[in-house]
Image (spheres, rainbow, N blue to C red):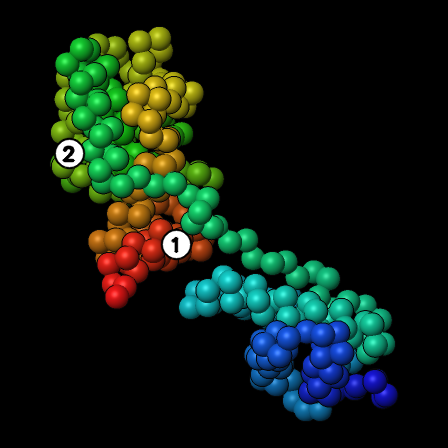
Amino acid sequence: MNAVPATISQSLESFKTHLLENDKSLNTIKSYSQDLNHFFKWVHQRYDPPHLISMLTSIDLKDYERQLKLDESIAPATINRRLVALMKWAEFLVTIGSTNVNLSSNIKIKKIQKQNNIRWLTRKEVGKLLHAIELTKQQNHKKGMLHQTIVYMAVNLGLRVQEICNVKIADIDFQTNIVNVNGKGNKHRIIPLTENTKEAIVNWLEVRDQESDYLLMSSKCNHITTRAVQHIFKKYSDQLGIEITPHSLRHTYCKQLAQHGVEIQSIAELAGHSSIETTRVYVTPSIQELQNALKRTEF
């Protein structure tokens, strides 16, 4: 490498040569080039020529990162790939002396919620859970009604376990069929009250024999705890041999909405997600779903 590149376009050519000399594959070099060209086009729109490396600052790269992450049309994996290319290029500029500092030092890779880390239940598994609760109702009607109400609030309303415990009777409007939820970060959202869930709540209110502003209570206190709810699900998990948690039922709620064509923005609002990227996992086919599709279509 002879002269230290002064312009951004010159640096790309030097970077490609550097990658080739370090035995990077042609596909890797092509991928880096495409991703860096995306950044260079952004620079061209931001500044008039000549586009010198010396005119760039870490703020420019941070602004580019922010714009990428705000663009909901770009998949998180694509965003991360472009940022990695930018970071490798910035490190290269320091190595060859084009800059004294790493311009990408403040860039952070986007966290991606992987589907393999998320557990949702099939409709058949939820059916087994509801059947087990019916058996509980035959033995202890009040206890079974409590369990059924909790399950419906998780799987039909998508409530977090803490939200389930915090729901007060005054939060439920039986006339307009809505539930007012104060969720994570004290964020308020409104959720439609489904027919089966409404029926379960009404039936529960008829059998509970303690007075409380809170909808759900246990025999020990007038406000059920998250630990008590988790204990209930643990017993059914052991009984059925299925991993069931309040959160897996919430995941099931979101997945069912996605499978029935509800738009990603609406799912995010119903679930109270702070970022739509959290919701994206439900509208992206899982490996298992793709494998099942291939089994049905292969020759």
In the rendered image, is residue 168 in sight?
no
Q: Position of residue 200 (x, y in %)?
A: 17, 27
Residue ranking furthest to the bottom? 49
Q: Position of residue 113 (x, y in %)?
A: 48, 50
Q: Nearer the viewer, mark 1 or mark 2?
A: 1
Question: Which comes sooner in the sequence, label 1 or label 2?
Answer: 2
Left or right placement of residue 7 versus residue 125 in this view: right
The quadrant in which residue 184 appears is: top left
Q: Amino acid at mark 2?
A: Asn
SS at circle 2: helix
Residue at coordinates 30% horizontally, 39% vertically from top-left?
A: 121
SS at circle 1: helix
Q: Which residue is mark 2?
A: 196
Residue at coordinates 31% horizontally, 46% vertically from top-left?
A: 254
- Foreground pick, 185 / 219: 219
Screen quadrant of the C terminus = bottom left
Q: Is residue 141 above or below residue 167?
A: above
Q: Amino acid at mark 1?
A: Ile
Q: Which residue is mark 1?
A: 287
In the rendered image, is residue 118 in sight?
yes
